[in-house]
Image (tube, rainbow, N blue to C red):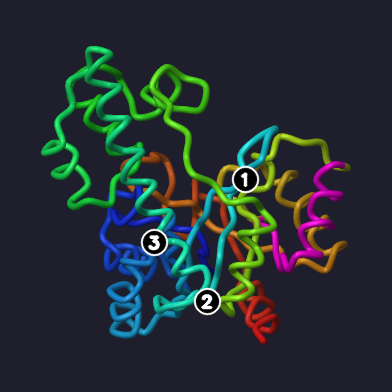
Amino acid sequence: MIDLHTHSRFSDGSDSPQGIVELAKAAGCSCVALTDHDRLDGIEAAWNRAKELEIGFVPGVEISCIFESGTFHLLAYFLEPTSGPLQDRLADIQKARSDRNMVLAARLREGGIPITWDELMEEAGGPNLGRPHFAAIMLKKGVVSSIQEAFDKYLAKGKPFYVPKVLLTPKEAIELVVASNALPVIAHPLTLGVSNNELVAILSELKEYGLVGAESYYARYSKDERISLVQTSQSLALVPTGGSDYHGTYKTGLQICVGEGDLEVPDSVLTELESRLS
């Protein structure tokens, strides 16, 4: 089995890139992908550790995109940490992310929740901040009783301290992935918040732009949801991929490779993905 959706401390996870690979090896994974948000910083360390442990590794990234009715995330697989159309664009996105973090910290302080930049650096282990790091400090200060509560009350879209991201359109993101010789796959597609018929229409349109897969074996989807997504993907000649969306302590209850205990992404998914590489 494999896990094609994990996050390290280089975006909004709590483990090191090497730690992600070590956890995957311990869980019996034959291959793991590191898909940090908007960053490729952890790829080299994870890849080197994968070689040492003799486990398969896929370099990747997760990108947020504009979508009105819900949340649209795009995974890019086999993306080399070098220069390229998407890689170069990620540098601009990272700058926007840093600016967003500064605004969020200021809003929290103005709202009576004193969070210092030093605290954020210590929590994140570096400058690669995400909202889970803010949430973790809020938990430590007793502002909330859990990471999830911090999002539900303060940090999620539509909540008092939410700061919008700089986002690409789905078409733009997919075309950048393709131009960078990588494979674009839509992450956790049910977060689009559309009906099944609408989802089929959207996936069909995205396929015209170059989409090659849809994350169907997702850790927090029910068995029926997974089966339905696999069938939908296959009906559109898309690869039904999958993963745990592991974030360590920032997203509790999930383990690499097995999700909440019942996740099993078959090795054949990786074989099918590799066949789509030009």
- The answer to whether residue 37 is above or below residue 117 is below
Using the rendered view, name the quadrant where residue 10 is placed. Answer: bottom left
The magenta region covers 198-215
The residue to which callout 3 is attached is 91
Name the spot of residue 230 as percent of width and height, x first: 76, 58
Label 3, residues with CA under 10 Å away: few <14, some 14-19, many ≥20 = some
Label drawn at residue 72: 1
Name the spot of residue 142 as percent of width and height, x first: 21, 18
Label 2, residues with CA under 10 Å away: few <14, some 14-19, many ≥20 = many
Depth check: 163 or 239 in front? 163
| Dot placed on the residue nearer the N-terminal end, 1 or 3 | 1
How far is disc 3 from disc 2 in space, using C-alphas? 18 Å
Name the spot of residue 86 as percent of width and height, x first: 51, 68
| Dot placed on the residue nearer the N-terminal end, 3 or 2 | 2
- Asked whether residue 11 appears in the rendered view, the answer is yes
The residue to which callout 2 is attached is 78
The residue at 33%/85% (across/down) is 51
Circle 1: element type = strand
Depth check: 197 or 24 in front? 197
The reply to whether the magenta stretch includes residue 20 is no
The residue at 45%/80% (across/down) is 56
Circle 2: element type = loop
